[in-house]
Image: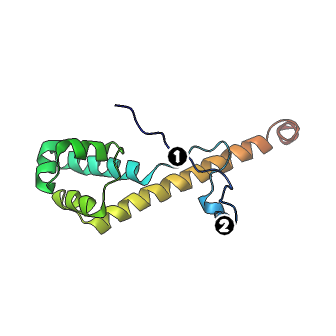
Amino acid sequence: MTEAPRLHAVPGGSPEGSQPAPASARTERGAAPEPLWREVLGEKLRGLRREHEETLVETAARAGISPQYLSEVERGLKEPSSEMIAAVAGALGTTLGGLAESVADELRGQREASKLMRYEMATRQRLSGPVALALAA
């Protein structure tokens, strides 16, 4: 089975006549693309299921979905509806809101880590060459 191509944000790109994307939503050159919501959601669901020491079959049965579909959701291949997410969350002893907060926190943390890494790289670049030699003297 082939995977669908992954869409990528275009830095500063916007349809003609529309407002440009806010700076926080733009992807910087050379920066790794942000993970998709469905990918982080899948990781969270798989983590919760494993914490409960359950198989795909057990969790899927309680949620009322097929194990194959749950597997695809966990791998970030499917974009489940909010009803589907709520059913799986309930089967894992959490709520849709709690799961959404957890995913948002993870995305926020990854964004902050990426910003810090870009800042450190920029700082290292400024402190190279003649500047670094002058500071070392």
Mark 1 surroundings: few (<14), some (14-19) or many (≥20) residues within 10 A: few
Q: Which residue occupies the foreground of this view, 15 or 34?
A: 15
Vertical side of 75 occupied by 106: above or below: below
Query: What's the residue at 39%, 48% (across, down)?
Result: 39
Q: Which residue is mark 2?
A: 18
Q: Which mark is residue 7?
A: 1
Q: Secondary structure at mark 2?
A: loop
Specify which label sits upstream in the sequence, 1 or 2.
Answer: 1
Mark 2 surroundings: few (<14), some (14-19) or many (≥20) residues within 10 A: few
Along the horizontal axis of the image, is 103 left or right of 22?
A: left
Q: What colouring does the structure picture have? A: rainbow
Along the horizontal axis of the image, is 103 left or right of 45?
A: right
Query: What's the residue at 24%, 59% (across, down)?
Result: 84
Q: Which mark is residue 66?
A: none
Q: The disc labelled 2 sits on which kind of residue?
A: Ser
Q: Residue furthest front?
A: 16
Q: CA distance from mark 1 to mark 2?
A: 20 Å
Q: Position of residue 126 (x, y in %)?
A: 79, 44
Along the horizontal axis of the image, is 54 left or right of 29?
A: left
